Image (cartoon, grey):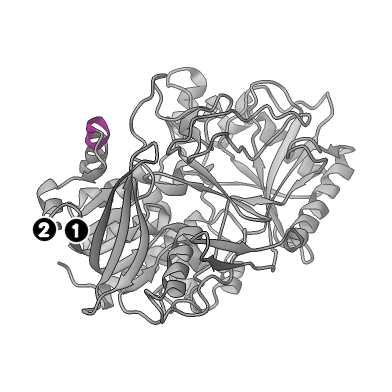
Amino acid sequence: MLGLAALGAAAIAGHTTITAAPQAAAATASSGSDSMFVPAVVVGTGYGAAVSALRLGEAGVQTLMLEMGQLWNQRGSDGNIFCGMLNPDKRSSWFKSRTEAPLGSFLWLDLANRDITPYAGVLDRVNFDQMSVYVGRGVGGGSLVNGGMAVTPRRSYFEEVLPQVNADEMYRTYFPRANSTLRVSNIDQTWFEQTEWYQYSRVSRQQADNAGLSTTFVPNVYDWDYMRREADGSAPKSGLAGEVIYGNNHGKVSLDKSYLAAALGTGKVTIQTLHQVKTVSQQSDGTYLLTVEQRDTDGKLLATKKVSCRHLFLGAGSLGSTELLLRARETGTLPNLSSEIGGGWGPNGNVMTARANHLWNPTGTNQSSIPALGIDDWDNPTHPVFAEIAPMPAGLETWVSLYLAITKNPERGTFVYNAAKDRADLRWTRDQNAPAVEAAKSLFDRVNSANTTIYRYDLFGKQIKAFADDFCYHPLGGCVLGKATDNFGRVSGYKNLYVTDGSLIPGSIGVNPFVTITAMAERNVERIIKEDVKAS
C-alpha cells in the first residue's frame, strides 16, 4: 500500500514530514518553511483525526495532519520499535523521569516502574488534582497503546447518551464502516478454549458463571491469525510477549496500518510529526492561523511555525482539543466560543479492580496481553457494568484476576483554563467516582461470594485499596455534541471549525469507546464534506 510505504520510508530517513506525494505536499507551503497555507488542517492522528484525514483526502482536499508525538517505526538498539512492559525504557513514556504504570505495585512493592530518561515516549499519564488520564503519543494516538478492544456500544445506551444522532444510520452504515476500515475481527473460539494463553480469561469466565453472570467475546483489531502463529512459534511474539501499554511490535492493526496508511495513499494527506499546536486564532478573511511548535524527541524546541487553513479539524482527543479551545476562548483569540467548551467530561465510568484466586485455580504463567472476554452485566437495573477481563502478564503465576470495569457513572467534570500554567485543569473529585466504585463492587462482591475469594489490595500503589478510581483510559467529553458544537461537530460560533474526537461524547458510552469515536467521525465528516468543504 502506498501509505504504508510512505510511513516506512519516512521512518528510515528520520523525517518528521510524511507524505506519499512529495510534490503535492510541497505545494502547500507558501513563502518559507515556517509559514504555509493548507486548505484543511487536522490536529492529531487519533481515531477521529484519522477518519477526517482519509475522507478529506479521498474528496481531493489537500490536508495537513499535525501530530505532537513521533512516528513509531524505527527500531531501537534491542531491535524493537517499542519496549516491553516488564522492562520499560525511555520509549515507554512521554517526557517522564520515571514510568507511571497503572498497576503501580505488587505486594505493595513498586516493581513495575523504572527510572528513565525524559523522551518523547509513546504513553502519557496526564495528572490532574484528583484524576489521571492515560493517552497515547505518536502517529496513531491511542491506537498505539490500547488493548484493541473494538466494542460497538449497546444500541439502547447509545440512544440514551446521544439521542440527537440517528441510531438507524449509525448501526446500519457508520459502525459497520468503522469496523471494516479498522479491520476488526473475532478470536477463533476453538483455539481460545484450548490455548494456555487465555487460561486467565477462562478462569474469570467460570467464576462469573458461578455468580450467575454472563460473559461475551469481544472483537479486536489485533490480528488473531498472527497471534496463533506467535503461539506455535512461527512468528515473533508481541501480544504473547506482554506488549500492550507501551506499544505492540507486531500483530496489532493500529491506525498507522489502517486509516492513516489509507489517508496517505490518497496522495492528498501529509503528516508532520513532533509538531504541537499551541494557539488557534481566526484571521480577517475567516481562515484559521495556528502557532505550531516543532521539537525533537528530547524536547528541544527546533522551530515555531505559522500554519493557516480554511477548514480546521480538532482531533487531539478529549484533553487536547478541549484545551486548545479553552485557551482560545479565555485568551481572546476565539472569543465567541461557547461557554459549553470544557463541560460534560467523564472517565467512561472506568474503575480497575483485582481478585485473589485460590491456589488450586491458577490464572496461568503465560497470558496474552490482548483481552478477549468481558463480563456483561449492563442490563443490571441498579448497577450496570461491562467489565473487561484484563491480563496480568507478569511472566509468573500470580493467581490474580484483573478487570477494567466500565460503569454508568452519571457524574461529570469540567475543564477550566489555568492562565498561570497555560493549561486546562480538570475540576473532578474522587468522590465523583463513588458511583463507579459502588457499581464495580456490587458486581465483584457477587463474584467473590460465589467463589469464596477476596479482593487484592496491593496492586494500586502503597495504599491498601481494592479499587483504582484515580485514573482512566477512556476520557470523553469537553466539547459535547449538540452543546459546544452542532449535531455534526461544527464548533458553535465559528464557521469551518470542527471537533472530530472523543470530546464530542458526553462522558460515557458504556464500552471501550474507540469504535464509537471512529463511527461518529465517519458520520460527521461525511456531512461536513458534502455541505462545507470543496476540493482544493
In the rendering, at what x and y percent does residue 377 appear? 72, 56
Mark 1 lies on a secondary structure that is strand
Q: Is residue 536 left or right of residue 459?
A: left
Residue picked out by circle 2: 31
Residue 14's disc number: none
Indicate left or right for 88 with 358 as reference.
Answer: left
The image quarter containing residue 111 is: top right
Q: Give, as a single range, the part of the protein colored magenta.
A: 9-13
Circle 1: residue type: Ser
Say which amino acid is labelled 2.
Answer: Ser
Task: Answer whether residue 333 is visible to the viewer in this image.
Answer: yes
Quadrant hosting residue 533: bottom left
**In the depicted view, which residue is nearer to us: 117 or 360?**
117
Secondary structure mostly taken by the magenta-highlighted segment of the chain: helix
Task: Say which of 505 and 227 sits in front.
Answer: 505
Q: Are marks 2 and 1 in contact (CB under 8 Å)?
A: yes
Q: 484 or 402: which is nearer to us?
A: 484
The stretch drawn in magenta includes residue 11: yes
Measure the alpha-carbon separation of dots 2 and 1.
Answer: 6 Å
Q: Nearer the viewer, residue 283 or 252?
A: 283
At horizontal 38% and vertical 76% (from top left) the residue drawn is: 334
Other residues around mark 1 within 10 Å, as few (<14) / some (14–19) / many (≥20): some
- Left or right position of 127 against 499: right
